[in-house]
Image: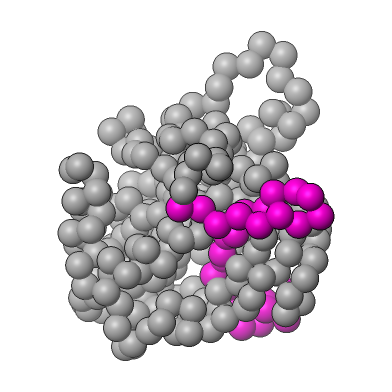
């Protein structure tokens, strides 16, 4: 499987990215991500009971999926240590368990000053991003969507364009507006960080050795969703580095 080989060979070990290359690499990743192409469509994690890797739990008779987000120490104060939490008006970007840990095992990350930068590269985050804690959540699949034009989570790829719908409902219109606004915020933001958002359902890995730039499948928990905090852990403890 050529795709799998590319994924692993790009992550054999953590290698220092020369300091002088960090900013140019990140800037180039944003320019590249802004124009997704058909040959960049790759297989994604499917959210389905048919996917044996996923972790499920029944809560009050409903199926919940285990996912994780990477955040700052300051942001952890907004969440309970465990138990129910409402996302209010703030969507949360997540990955499905165990995608992240599997990929980081392939990275063979060791505890070093370079590890946080390598994880930021994998997630398509700015080199200055403040991230030091992982939070695991239990979430209902209906409260998840892919951050791409076709938002379904139970298929294996993201298309480049919005699906054709004769009479779009309010949810469809809202998703299209959200995607278009995210395009502006990601690539043309003059007031804050820009991001190499792929629009294709996976993170943009801007490490120079990953020639495919394919990171890991990403999802978004919808605003105003009731989820459950499973645990809050430091990056080193969570990834065992």
User: Which residue is at a point 34% across and 39% down the rendered structure image?
Assistant: 42
Which residue appears farthest toward the bottom when viewing the image? 112
User: Which residue is at a point 55% across and 31% down the rendered structure image?
Assistant: 150
Residue 52: say if magenta. no
Q: In terms of image quadrants, where is residue 9?
A: bottom left
Q: Position of residue 3 (x, y in %)?
A: 24, 44
Q: Quadrant of the N terminus?
A: top left
Q: Is residue 46 above or below residue 127?
A: above
Look at the image and tell me whether residue 89 can be seen: no
Q: Position of residue 116 (x, y in %)?
A: 39, 79
Left or right of residue 106: residue 100: right
Left or right of residue 234: residue 117: left
Look at the image and tell me whether residue 61 can be seen: yes
**Depth check: 164 or 180 in front?**
164
Q: Is residue 46 above or below residue 187?
A: above
Q: Position of residue 179 (x, y in %)?
A: 59, 39
User: Which residue is at a point 50% across and 40% down the rendered structure image?
Assistant: 50
Magenta region: which residues? 53-79
**Depth check: 125 or 144 in front?**
144
**Depth check: 146 or 211 in front?**
146
User: Which residue is at a point 25% across and 54% down the rendered structure image?
Assistant: 7
Residue 58: say if magenta. yes
């Amino acid at each position: 499987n050529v795709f799998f080989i590319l994924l692993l060979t790009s992550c054999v070990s953590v290698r220092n990215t020369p300091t002088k290359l960090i900013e140019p690499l990140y800037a180039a990743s944003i320019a590249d991500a802004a124009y997704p192409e058909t040959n960049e469509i790759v297989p994604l994690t499917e959210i389905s009971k048919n996917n044996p890797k996923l972790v499920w739990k029944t809560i009050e008779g409903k199926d919940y999926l285990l996912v994780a987000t990477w955040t700052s120490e300051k942001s952890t104060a907004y969440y309970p240590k465990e138990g129910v939490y409402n996302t209010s008006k703030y969507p949360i970007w997540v990955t499905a368990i165990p995608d992240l840990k599997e990929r980081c095992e392939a990275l063979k990350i060791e505890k070093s000053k370079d590890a946080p930068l390598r994880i930021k590269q994998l997630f398509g985050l700015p080199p200055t991003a403040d991230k030091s804690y992982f939070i695991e959540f239990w979430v209902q699949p209906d409260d998840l969507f892919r951050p791409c034009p076709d938002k379904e989570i139970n298929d294996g790829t993201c298309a480049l364009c919005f699906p054709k719908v004769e009479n779009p409902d309010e949810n469809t219109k809202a998703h299209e507006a959200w995607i278009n606004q995210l395009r502006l915020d990601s690539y043309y933001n003059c007031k804050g960080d820009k991001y190499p958002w792929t629009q294709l359902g996976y993170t943009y890995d801007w490490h120079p050795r990953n020639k495919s730039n394919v990171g890991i499948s990403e999802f978004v928990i919808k605003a105003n969703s009731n989820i459950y905090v499973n645990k809050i852990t430091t990056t080193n403890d969570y990834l065992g580095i």
